[in-house]
Image (cartoon, rainbow, N blue to C red):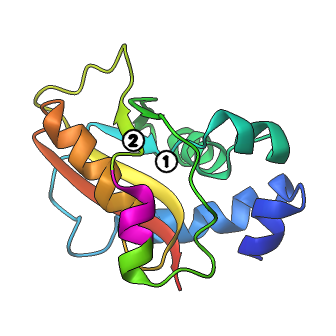
Amino acid sequence: MIHRFKYREGRHLRGPLTDLLVEGLTDPRLAGRPIDAIVPVPLHAARLRARRYNQAEVLAETLSARTGLRVLSALRRVRATRTQTRLDREERMENLRGAFVPAHNARVQGLHLVVLDDVFTTGATTHDCARALREAGAASVRVLTVARG
């Protein structure tokens, strides 16, 4: 289902996938902790043109509509990276190192943020996103994904 959502114009699947994210927000590791905003993982401009939409952004907007949490476009992907599908953990970490920076208008100082992505495999993507947000002054950064794979 995630593959179809991500690669085959599967935006109609955002509802069932968002159900899983709402469930994730009730996870005991997140419960009782403040969340100021959701930050979707950005795509590089070239990949966005190819896919025509950012799946993490679509999920973030749908989750926001259901929960009232605001969406912040607080990250920018500053360089294109190889697809991660066939890379091991070390290769993924190296591939993404420094790929994300705070957006020019990012105002995250003191905020408790949740980075949202579709799949958590090795954590390389969310690790670099969290690094950039912490460097910009976020008070905390947690991760929420639809699946682990």
Q: Does the magenta stretch include residue 73?
A: no
Of callouts 2 and 1, the N-terminal one: 1
User: Where residue 46 sits in the image (x, y, percent)?
Assistant: 72, 38
Q: What residue type is labelled 2?
A: Phe
- Helix, strand, or loop for circle 2? strand
61 or 98: nearer the viewer = 98
**Residue plotted at (55% across, 71% down):** 20
Q: What residue type is labelled 1?
A: Val
User: Where residue 83 sits in the image (x, y, percent)?
Assistant: 64, 65
- For marks 2 and 1, give the CA distance: 9 Å
Q: Can residue 146 be seen in this view?
A: yes
| Region of the chain picked out in magenta, as a range | 92-97
> In which quadrant will I find the N terminus?
bottom right
> Which residue is identified by label 1?
41
Q: Is residue 95 magenta?
A: yes
Per the picture, the main secondary structure of the magenta-coloured stretch is helix
Where residue 109 sits, quadrant-wise, is top left
- Helix, strand, or loop for circle 1? loop
Above or below — where is 41 with respect to 72?
Answer: below
Q: In this view, does 88 lie to the left or right of 109?
A: right
> Which residue is identified by label 2?
100
Q: In this view, does 37 lie to the left or right of 133?
A: right
**Residue plotted at (40% across, 38% down):** 69
User: Where residue 84 sits in the image (x, y, percent)?
Assistant: 58, 70
50 or 31: nearer the viewer = 50
Above or below — where is 103 with respect to 130?
Answer: above
Find out whether the residues at labels 2 and 1 contact each other: C-beta distance under 8 Å.
Answer: yes
Viewer-nearest of labels 2 and 1? 2
Residue found at the very far top of the displayed protein: 105
Q: In this view, does 44 lie to the left or right of 101?
A: right
User: Where residue 61 sits in the image (x, y, percent)?
Assistant: 59, 39
93 or 116: nearer the viewer = 93
